[in-house]
Amino acid sequence: MKNLKAAILAAIIFYCACPRAAAQAPLYKDPKASPAERAADLLGRMTAEEKFGQLQQLDGLWEGDYRKEHLELAREGRLGSTLNVRFAANVNILQKEAVEHSRLGIPLLFAFDVIHGYRTIFPVPLGESAQWDPELAGKAASAAAEEAYSVGLKWTFAPMVDIARDPRWGRIVEGSGEDPYLGSRLAAARVRGFQGADFSAPGKLLACAKHWVGYGAAEAGRDYNSTNISRSALRNVYFPPFKAALDAGAATFMSAFNDLNGVPSTANKAAIAGTLRGDWGFKGFVVSDYTSVKELIAHGLAADEEDAAVKALSAGVDMEMVSTLYRDKGPAALSAGRLSLPVLDASVLRVLEMKFRAGIFEKPYIDPALETKKLLTPKTRKLALEAALKSLVLLRNTGGLLPLGPGLKKIAVVGALADSKTDMLGSWSADGKPADAVTLLEGVRETVSPGTEVVYSSGCSPSAGTDEELAKAVAAASEADVIIAAVGEEASMSGEASSRAFLSLPGRQLELLERLKKTGRPVVAVLFNGRPLELSWLDANIPAILEAWYPGTEGGRAVAQTLFGRSNPGGKLPVTFPLTLGQVPIYYAHRSTGRPPSAAEKYSSKYTDSPVEPLYPFGYGLSYSSFTYSGLSVTPAKIKADGKAIVKVAVTNSSSRSGDEIAQLYIRDAAGSETRPVRELKGFKRVTLSPGETKTLEFELGPAELGYYYEDGFAVEPGLFGVYASGSSEGGLEARLEVMP
Ligand code: NOJ
């Protein structure tokens, strides 16, 4: 009887299930099923080789082509993603192998470093950070995503959210500077810009918060160097922008090159499995940096290639960029039990689930017609101009030399950087074309009044300049009413693998400036550079200095419009400019010491041969307008640890010119379980004020702003807090807030 029942049941199941199973597409192909269900179903159908294949990312050619072997790998289901492959002609061919000719038809994810624009290039991230305008940074990221998507990309390795406090490190140009609060606001804005509300939508990209973690603290500023970061600094300084990126929905993270406190980031279980996935609940996937899995051997963490693969994968690095150890050594490690199947499956699931969420199973191809419609449109150029204008920081303007008046007869533009299209774009300029860029010289020529003669002489570049070239430039300049000297660094002097041991102006540029000064003509220095430089001679000798960073496609136009007063500079420094190299690392949010610097006290924390103060502090920047702060209030002045206070301050444009001010709010936690920085940024607002106009700005100070990580968690400690409102990290108005026990 029992057997009969079982047989009937089996027959019913067979009758119901079999014909359907034969006719129905597998669950993973059903767009109505959830990404998690689809990923689980797909995983169940995969061989070990296909699983490792999904974890492999390979590099195409810099020009955008795939490599021949990619076709075969895609067909065999042994490739998950590529970087640098782009343009419909390449992407669609390679994708077709994966989608239509591989056993399971899993699409590839096409990635690229879209860092500050794709074809329309916006200011380098450090320059963009000088805008202090997260909304604008988000718009630039969104425009970059739309362009990049149009050439078949679906994933950008951005934003780079590493805090950097050492200008010798070349990659300081790629981030938001030294401050975790500013960095967090920008990280979130950029992630939202790239991804939008739904990253599966056309025109959106998956973002990648990088480099997890601590990469910016490279010892001695040397790229790829080891880092030693205290637990407190990690949690209060280096982690926050990553957490902000995650909270904004960042789909992926990239593990960093650096050794972090003795465990390379690419095998750092505590950071990846512990903090990122465990404590923060990150659900996306982690990609290694370029060959960083293999580099575990050079680090001295892994004994051999298999050991490196096992350690990286077991730490939670899901996808391997460029090196091929997962693919080559993973299967043997799996069979021998040195790599666990659940570890492998978890990584594959994370990658697959993200591919489902990205919508590429449904939309694997790109319409070739899109490219021509989306790239470098009048709209993106306009946005690039706005972005460049807002990123400029006026460092000095003695005697109101700027803005330049309309009545000038002759202007000399000097310095090879003034006429270099490549150097307008900066490092990581994706598919930006130098030919699209407006140079400073072009900008000046189109901006001056018809009666003004513009002469140009290169003098020298950051890396070359002969005696004759210098002499020629000085001769040309000595006849001019005003000299505009473009100095700084070539774009390639900052960025990856471009650390410097000196922060001086490279080459003969200082000599050029000295000789220009001797002409007696007023000199305006325009700086193109990707890091804080040592500018003390300029500050003492050149009346007007404008920091232009690498301002992007519309850069030269933006600088010229600013020099001639069509636009009023309002950017502020996102990073401290030291007085001298010996002060490095120098940042505003340092802790006090038991012996703070004091001129009167020898045994205090200072130098015998240099001031301790920087040349230009974090948050500093001038304007053609002037602003005054008044009426700082904190209400209530006493709160509980879970309470909130409202800070109000009035900012007045006390000049006759409309302009932007970036009002900044800082706190100091006076005493607690751990010592806290002398100041910490906790709010800012960029506002435009007409002549004489006053705006009262409001900020909130609550647990998120007043708390910090100590011992085991994040908390607000009772006690006194200083509250400061100012136009830079120094000076300003001061009030107090008490947190009661
Ligand atoms: C190495 C860099 O560190 C990383 O930022 C970049 O995204 C990858 N190369 C890919 O180009």
Image (cartoon, grey):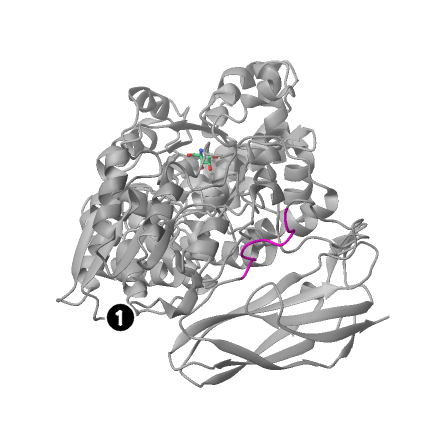
Amino acid type at circle 1 is Gly
| Residue 689 position in % (x across, y down) | 43, 79
Question: What residue did someone put label 1 on?
Answer: 405
In the image, the segment drawn in magenta is 610-619
- Would residue 518 be found to the left or right of residue 127 on screen? left
Q: In the image, is residue 583 above or below residue 330?
A: below
Which image quadrant is residue 741 in?
Answer: bottom right
As helix, strand or loop, the secondary structure at mark 1 comes to loop
Q: Front-most of 643 and 583?
A: 583
For the point 29% across and 67% down, the residue is: 404
The secondary structure that dominates the magenta segment is loop
Ligand 1 visible in quadrant: top left
- Assess whether residue 60 is covered by the magenta stretch: no
For the point 22% across and 71% down, the residue is: 406
Can I make out residue 301 in this image?
A: yes
Q: In the image, is residue 551 above or below residue 631?
A: above
Q: Front-most of 197 and 720?
A: 720
